[in-house]
Amino acid sequence: MAYEHIPVMLAEVIEWLSPKPGNIFVDGTVGGSGHATAICNAIAPDGIFIGLDQDRDAIDNANRVLKGFNTTVHLFHGNFVKMPDFLSQINIPAVDGILLDLGISFHHLATSGRGFSFRKDEPLDMRMDTRSRVNARELVNDLGEAELRRLFQRYGEERWSKQIARRIVLERKQHAIHSSRQLADIVCQAVPKAAWKPGFHPATRIFMALRIVVNKELERLEQFLDTAADFLKPGGRMCVLSFHSLEDRIVKQRFRALENPCTCPPDLPVCACGRQPILKVLTKKTQRPSAEEVMANPMARSTKLRAAEKLWN
């Protein structure tokens, strides 16, 4: 199966990561291998590339795409939170750069057959890793109305969460909700037509919320950022591409905490806690894709890039 995806902000990612020949790099979300290809080109010859992805399709695709580079390539099927274990397996204690692209790929929307798109009629699954136990169908059919409402509010920031949750519960009393098209139609019925926005499908936030919960995206991002800097060499860089405010907020806050970990009261003249900065944030403001890139690839429009560098202390 072809794995189609256009890498977002490719030039900016390479600029911020600054890969060089012989470097060791981790791509924690190898996806369609667009960023991976550029990194492998930059670290050749003799570089080491470690690609991770929880989607088996992405790993199979990377095996094909990354053949022939003058670099050592290690690929692992698993979520990026397992990076410490994967690095331990190949006896690499630290790396020169880490990339995370948290966006959903065109492959997932168009050809995965797992119900990620509200424009298709597919089984309501939404698992990136098909080995995972919980899928979207179970959440939609098993959670109570209040639980669904909270899920849509917290992870989708959906204004019409109450009405949508109520409609889902009413509909599933008649028949179980098995497909992405079924769910999308239910959401459209629940959201008043006057509230529909041009170019924005009413089910967008609901599908996003379910995908986040099914794949534990926010919890895993927080867990990863708690330890990722420990695996960077001094001067090594980390770059994260996020696609909605919940992700970006986590990255922003964690980078800020690692840059300024002091917990002393603001009026204390000298630091007493002894906590030293670990990272230097390179992107003081969120980096966004150019208008030209968004025009060529509309999936890039919500991208937010943040980068940081490991300090030498």
Image (cartoon, grey):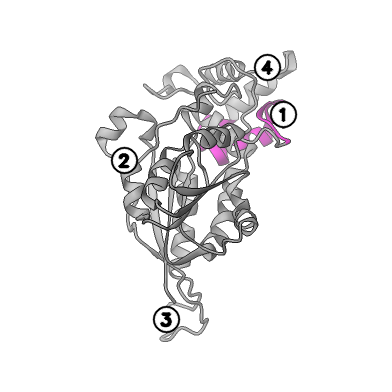
**Residue at image point 54% right, 65% down:** 230
Task: Kindly report which numbered mark, 1 or 4, lies closer to the viewer in this rendering.
Answer: 1
Circle on res. 138: 1
Judge whether residue 139 can be spotted in this image.
yes
Magenta stretch: give its range.
133-161
Question: Which residue is labeled 2 in the image?
Answer: 289
CB under 8 Å between discs 1 and 2: no
Looking at the rendered structure, the kind of residue marked 2 is: Pro
Indicate the secondary structure of the residue bearing disc 3: loop
Residue 152 visible in the snapshot: no
Secondary structure state at the residue bearing disc 4: helix
Q: Residue at x 51, y 31 (%)?
A: 205
Is residue 160 on the magenta stretch? Answer: yes
Q: CA distance from mark 1 to mark 3?
A: 52 Å
Foreground tag (2 vs 4): 2
Few, some or many C-alpha atoms within 10 Å of disc 3 (few <14, some 14-19, many ≥20)?
few
Give the residue type at disc 3: Asp
Crowd band around label 4 with a 10 angstrom C-alpha radius: few (<14), some (14–19), many (20+): some
Which quadrant is home to the C terminus? Answer: bottom left
Query: Label 4: which residue?
Result: 171
Residue 270 image position (x, y, % from top left): 43, 86
Q: Quick check: 16 left or right of 66?
A: left
Q: Secondary structure at mark 2?
A: loop
* Image quadrant in which the N terminus is located: top right
Q: Are marks 3 and 2 in contact (CB under 8 Å)?
A: no
Sort mark 1 into few (<14), some (14-19) or many (20+) by Cα contacts within 10 Å: some
Callout 2: 10 Å neighbours few (<14), some, many (20+)? some
- Residue 125, compared with residue 228, is above or below; it is above
Q: State which tag comes first along the sequence, 1 or 4.
A: 1
